[in-house]
Image (cartoon, rainbow, N blue to C red):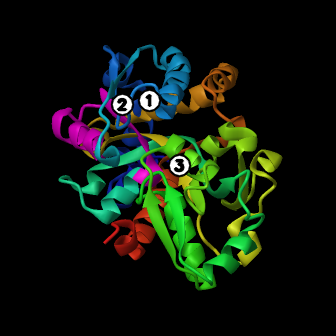
Amino acid sequence: MDYNAMKRRQFLKTSAAAGGTLLAGGLMSSPAWAAYPDRNIDVIVPTRAGGGADRLLRAVSSVWKKHLNTNFEPGFFPGASGRVGYEVYMGKYQPDAYSLIFGNMGPEVLNWAVKAPSFDINDYFYFGRVDTDPGVVFVGAESKFQSIDDIIAEGKKRKLNVGTSRLAHPASIGILALGEEVGVEFNLVPLSGGKKTVAGAVTLEMDFCVLTSGSVIAAGDACRTLLVFDNKNLAGDKLSNAPTMNDYFGTKLPPMYSARAFGIHKAAADKYPDRLELLQKTFKDAMNDPAYKDAFLKSKGFWPYSNYGGVTECEEFKNAMLELGGRYRSLLTGK
């Protein structure tokens, strides 16, 4: 269910049938909907140019612009694990649906669980998910650990050092939940980024590492995956045919994804529901366009992780991250 559908359902409960008809049918033919957009749309990216989010944004927008009949202008605001970009978007851009944020829901929402931002986290929402890349437990090819059981056995003898790209990360949550399940404590060590985290495993500087799987797949034979924080290992032998945590340990942990998605000011959605409706429709059309797969693959994406999601899916994931982030807050802050 999309945002406008949810708003309409609420409206119809308290409005006359004529009002409901106006909302249900009037938006699609309104002059405002027909005129929008009449200029380019800004997209705020809370990471650096040239990274995975940049490549994926360009892949999506290269197809989406044909359906929406406008161009997308990215602006990159890295810093503070994504916080800077959100603060810029919420503080400096008008809520008129001419600006969007392209965020990584997993680690960036965990930021709000660790430390609240200057704005109300309900003042924006995600409406268009692009991908879902699960977190994994992995080691370097020369590691003595051959299975997740080896890590647990060693962890019962001593506290293991676990490399992670940042403390507030879905994969960090995954390993903390595993430790809680099996009665083992892990020492999370932030290594500032995916490349350094892979290096921490390959050089054996860390006992093992956790990260989203795309970077591990890209490392090829240099790494060996031992566990996947998802409902299924969609990458198969690219992730060493590793088991999932829920299957192997009988847990019910939600998928620990790095999931890129487009977000928008709630005020823009409330003031211009017709504009949001057009954004949602054309975004989904772009994701279903055969040209999108070619663009996605050229961006070095792993196609099985391309995974459309609307407002409902994004909200469910956002709430799960907030809940788990709150549960493990003390461990994610390093204090």
- Which stretch did the figure color magenta? 83-107
Give the alpha-carbon distance from disc 2 to disc 3, as whole Å: 41 Å
Residue at mark 3: 197
Does label 3 or label 1 sit earlier along the sequence? 3
Where residue 4 sits in the image (x, y, percent)? Answer: 41, 45
Residue at mark 2: 275
Q: Tally the marks.
A: 3
**153 or 212: which is nearer to us?**
153
Q: Is residue 274 in view from this perspective? A: no
Dot 1 lies on which element? helix
Where residue 233 sits in the image (x, y, percent)? Answer: 75, 54
Does label 2 or label 3 sit earlier along the sequence? 3
Residue in view at x 53 percent, y 29 percent: 56
- What amino acid is found at the position of numbered circle 3 in the picture? Thr
Residue at mark 1: 278
Where residue 240 sits in the image (x, y, percent)? Answer: 79, 52
